[in-house]
């Protein structure tokens, strides 16, 4: 009965993840009078405490606007006005999970680079959090560098840092099956005007910008701040949509393995096959909804070969001559070595239509 149960858990998790991706959670760091309950979890505008300053309330309202849907919640961490840095808030968000973070006064407070560094460290430490920051060239897939100088909603004009909350809401409200490229911000009436070449240059530099198409204000291209493709990464990592999907799969598989497998099964070949089957079930559901394509997951035969040579006293000659199926059955102590390949589905962005007349 173990195999079907694990498949059901993993498949159900995939379905739930697709549903949750429609409404991500935002962490917001502000300075204000600290409320009795801190942080404050806000699901809708009516939840915003009236004790907060009007400027902070406005920032939360901006975030809650979302895009296709509203964010699931805004977790508002309030720091004292005299706080020298954001350490207390960042420590909180290193433990309590949110998808996106924004800091409406990060530039004024001189904390943008510190937050970017924290995000890089968190992502290395398995917390796949992302942040929208003003004018911060972080060269990191987890940092969105928003640089549009001004955006207007009616008579209200917002600076770059003030509008990061709105951008975080857009990204948190974009479902797994869509992207934020060309997302129309229906409430925004105007923004800084850039020429086509200026927009292209900004995007290539890892800047997230808005543009006015003559009728409405849109997101230009939904890119993060990554400009250098490091070893183990690719050009696709520059796309917010792709990174969102990778982060979700990463989080889901780790959590499901920890909750349902690690420490609960002996590390036998049969039990490894149960885990492998469960992961395949999860990825099959991801393929069904189109989030990924061409998924292949199996035992990492070459790593197992190397392990038994290094740790189990098997000669390299014997290990290299061993059939793959026999390698898969080798005992590897407490370790399980698996490998997967897949294509993360991006959205349509560049369309070429050749018309012959």
Image (cartoon, rainbow, N blue to C red):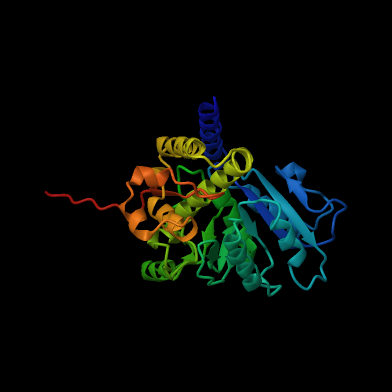
Q: Quadrant of the N terminus?
A: top right
Residue 232, percent from left and from top:
42, 63
Can residue 221 be seen from the camera position used here?
A: no
In the image, residue 304 above or below residue 192: above
| Residue farthest toward the top in the current orientation of the protein | 1
Q: Is residue 136 left or right of residue 198?
A: right
Residue at the image point whose x is 49% and y is 46% from the top: 331
Q: Is residue 47 left or right of residue 296?
A: right
Count of numbered badges drawn on the protein: 0
In the image, residue 170 above or below residue 83: above
Say which of 313 and 16 sits in front: 313
In the image, residue 19 above or below residue 349: above
Say which of 345 and 147 sits in front: 345
Quadrant in the picture for residue 159 = bottom right
Residue 201, percent from left and from top:
40, 71
Q: Is residue 298 left or right of residue 170?
A: left
| Residue farthest toward the left in the current orientation of the protein | 357
| Residue farthest toward the right in the current orientation of the protein | 36
Residue at the image point whose x is 58% and y is 60% from the top: 123
Quadrant in the picture for residue 189 = bottom right
Say which of 210 and 264 sits in front: 264
Residue at the image point whose x is 68% and y is 72% from the top: 111
Residue at the image point whose x is 64% and y is 58% from the top: 101
Residue 169, percent from left and from top:
60, 51
Can residue 299 be seen from the camera position used here?
A: yes
Say which of 65 and 276 sits in front: 276
Residue 60, percent from left and from top:
70, 53
């Amino acid at each position: 009965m173990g195999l079907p149960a694990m498949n059901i858990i993993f498949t159900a998790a995939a379905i739930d993840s697709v549903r949750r991706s429609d409404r991500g959670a935002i962490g917001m760091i502000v300075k204000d009078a600290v409320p009795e309950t801190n942080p404050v979890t806000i699901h809708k505008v009516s939840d915003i405490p009236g004790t907060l300053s009007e400027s902070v309330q406005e920032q939360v309202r901006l975030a809650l606007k979302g895009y296709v849907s509203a964010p699931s919640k805004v977790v508002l961490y309030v720091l004292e006005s005299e706080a020298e840095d954001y350490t207390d808030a960042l420590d909180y968000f290193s433990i309590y999970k949110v998808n996106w973070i924004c800091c409406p006064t990060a530039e004024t407070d001189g904390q943008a680079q510190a937050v970017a560094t924290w995000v890089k460290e968190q992502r290395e430490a398995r917390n796949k959090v992302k942040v929208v920051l003003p004018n911060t060239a972080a060269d990191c897939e987890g940092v969105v560098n928003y640089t549009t100088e001004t955006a207007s909603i009616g008579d209200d004009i917002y600076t770059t840092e003030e509008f990061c909350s709105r951008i975080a809401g857009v990204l948190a409200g974009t479902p797994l099956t869509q992207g934020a490229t060309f997302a129309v911000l229906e409430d925004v009436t105007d923004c800084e005007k850039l020429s086509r070449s200026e927009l292209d240059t900004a995007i290539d530099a890892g800047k997230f910008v808005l543009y006015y198409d003559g009728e409405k204000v849109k997101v230009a291209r939904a890119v993060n701040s990554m400009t250098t493709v490091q070893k183990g990464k690719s050009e696709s990592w520059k796309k917010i949509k792709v990174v969102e999907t990778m982060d979700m799969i990463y989080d889901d598989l780790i959590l499901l393995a920890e909750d349902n497998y690690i420490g609960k099964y002996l590390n036998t070949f049969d039990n490894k096959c149960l885990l492998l089957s469960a992961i395949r079930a999860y990825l099959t559901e991801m393929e069904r909804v189109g989030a990924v394509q061409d998924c292949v997951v199996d035992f990492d035969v070459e790593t197992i070969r190397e392990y038994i040579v290094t740790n189990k006293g098997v000669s390299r000659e014997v290990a290299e001559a061993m059939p793959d199926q026999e390698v898969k059955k080798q005992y590897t102590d407490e370790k399980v070595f698996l490998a997967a390949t897949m294509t993360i589905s991006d959205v349509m962005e560049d369309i070429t239509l050749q018309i012959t007349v």
